[in-house]
Amino acid sequence: MRRFLVVQNRSFGSSVEMYLKTIAELTNEREPVPVTSVADRLGISTVSASEMIHRLEARKLVKHRPYKGVYLTEVGRRKANGVIRRQRLWECFLNDVLGIPWEHVHDFACQLEHATHPVVTEALADFLEHPSTCPHGNPIPNADGEMPTLEGVPLANLKPGEKGVILRIHPVSEELVKHLDERGISPGREIEVTEIAPFNGPQSIEVGDEVHVLGREVAAHVMIRQTAETS
């Protein structure tokens, strides 16, 4: 029987992983990522975020541009994608195997990702038959730390009469997913914008036979593969 020595890497703790993952997720929206955005996402002060970013830069995991923001180095990007891979595999396991609703799996997986040995990660991937996306539709990086190309446009960008298929929800929070789930908005569903309130107001959207109103901030988290407009 093979035996594996599990050693906790104290120099690369969960707080470092959370910073790298957060920067990676925010990079999809803007690069370099403003330090204030990192602080806001993690719920900490800008001073605390700046201090940690300087430590990460000393370890060559990020680069910081004064007054502009921070971005991941190649090493930092691969480490961040490794954390994302573990989290999204756990989300699949919790949802597909244990039957935990998709709006709850993100927070549980976030706790598990920091305590998962690489051997366990790959065993989990094998058990799940290597899923390509998590329950929220977000792509799962491969074992080499490479992230598949992200596709889709935000629902908030669509105009009345435009429609598409929901690809993914990003970034994920339990409150956001619950809000969307209550309105039948999930990956794979067809969705159409029927109306936009004046002055760049909320969107009225149709999912199935139901019409709902979504604020533009919420709609910005719903990524769509756009299809033909309604004639």
Image (tube, rainbow, N blue to C red):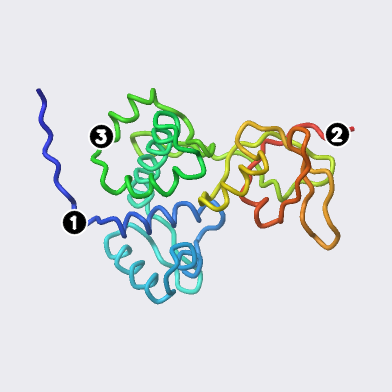
User: How far apart are the alpha carbons under marks 2 and 3?
Assistant: 48 Å
**Residue under pointer 3:** 120
Residue drawn at 71 percent across, 56 percent down: 215
Q: List x then y, in percent, for residue 70.
A: 44, 63
Residue drawn at 44 percent across, 57 percent down: 23
**Residue under pointer 1:** 10
Query: In this view of the protein, which residue sits in the foreground, 79 or 217?
Result: 217
CB contact under 8 Å: marks 2 and 3:
no
User: How far apart are the alpha carbons under marks 1 and 3?
Assistant: 18 Å
Q: List x then y, in percent, for residue 24.
A: 44, 52
Of labels 1 and 3, earlier in sequence is 1
CB contact under 8 Å: marks 1 and 3:
no
**Residue under pointer 2:** 230
Q: Quadrant of the C terminus?
A: top right
Query: In this view of the protein, which residue sits in the foreground, 98 or 144?
Result: 98
| Crowdedness near tag 1: few (<14), some (14–19) or many (≥20) residues, C-alpha within 10 Å | few
Q: Is residue 14 left or right of residue 152?
A: left
User: How far apart are the alpha carbons under marks 1 and 2?
Assistant: 56 Å
Q: Secondary structure at mark 2?
A: loop
Name the amino acid type tagged 2.
Answer: Thr
In the rendered image, which quarter is residue 199 located in?
Answer: bottom right
Of labels 2 and 3, earlier in sequence is 3
